[in-house]
Image (cartoon, rainbow, N blue to C red):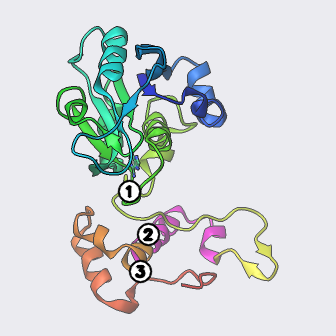
Amino acid sequence: MRIHIFTLFPEMFQGPLDHSILGRAAAGGLLDLSLHNIRDHADGPHRSVDDYPYGGGPGMVMKPEPLFAAVESVLGSTSPGFPVVLLTPQGRQFTQAEAQRLATEPTVALICGHYQGVDERIRRHLATEELSIGDYVLTGGELAAMVVVDAVARLLPGVLGSAEAAAADSYATGLLQHPHYTRPAQFRGWSVPEILLSGNHEQIARWRREQSLRHTRERRPDLLQSAPLSEEERRLLNTPDQLTRDPSSTD
Ligand code: ADE
């Protein structure tokens, strides 16, 4: 997959995306990240990329010309036929479902907004969609773009070590994850639940599913509305003491 990132601060991406799983994905040719500095496409002696807002008010606004020029010079046109995503707190909420959708695209462009905002013509005539990574305001779209790249890239075939790892994720199943344990079986007096040491795969799978249901009911009950659950699971959820408790849990 190819991801074009249009930003005023390409250096910010060096580091976070070069290491670990994403670094390997790039080295293995599964992910091709192209960084484009918007300022390279700005004219005038100062190569300015922002200006005062018409109508007055605080802050600066990102000018349309450099960004249109950057996108046109890299993508050939301003409607290249793939998602051109503006990262902005005004966007639709970025979710696992959005990550899955973007991961099916061969090419995606991400535009990192800055300053008080971007000129409305960028939003209307350059971006094909707007995404927000959460209900808070960052200093720019760069960290949001990194979040999107990370969440999308790990869904690409071959990027994670095992295909099941992504399928069992929180949110991919519609529920929060069950607890995980590794060695040692005893640590500072806290023990691993007996069932996980039993070798009984069927019971372990049932226990894990129950833990997922319990965690989700306690922490994110909103997810239960749309989670694909069996009749039996819905019944268990509605009867408070039916789900086994993780004995090590403090919930
Ligand atoms: N730019 C600033 N804040 C943002 C957010 N929450 N999501 C996406 N882009 C942003």
**Real-space CA distance between mark 3 and mark 1, rounded to the nearest whole angstrom:** 21 Å
Number of other residues with Cα within 10 Å of mark 2, as a class: few under 14, some 14 to 19, many 20 or more: many
Tag of residue 125? none
Residue 29: image x %, image y %? 54, 17
Query: Is residue 125 in view?
Result: yes
Percent position of residue 142, x then y: 48, 38
Q: In this view, does 250 lie above or below 49?
A: below
Residue shown at the point (42%, 47%) measured from the top left: 167
Q: Mark 1 points at which residue?
A: 134
Q: Are marks 3 and 1 in contact (CB under 8 Å)?
A: no
Q: Which of marks 2 and 1 is nearer the N terminus?
A: 1
Ligand 1 within 8 A of label 1's CB? yes
The residue lying at 26 percent from left, 66 percent from top is 229
Near mark 1 (Cα within 10 A), the count class, few <14, some 14-19 or many ≥20, is some
Residue at which label 3 appears: 218
On the rendered structure, is 84 left or right of 201? Answer: left
**In the image, which residues are magenta?**
194-214
Residues at marks 2 and 3, CA–CA distance in whole angstroms:
10 Å
Rendered view: 13 above or below 249: above
Left or right of residue 77: residue 143: right
Nearer-the-camera pick, 129 or 176: 129
Give the residue at x 49% y 22%. Answer: 33
Q: Name the residue under label 2.
A: 212
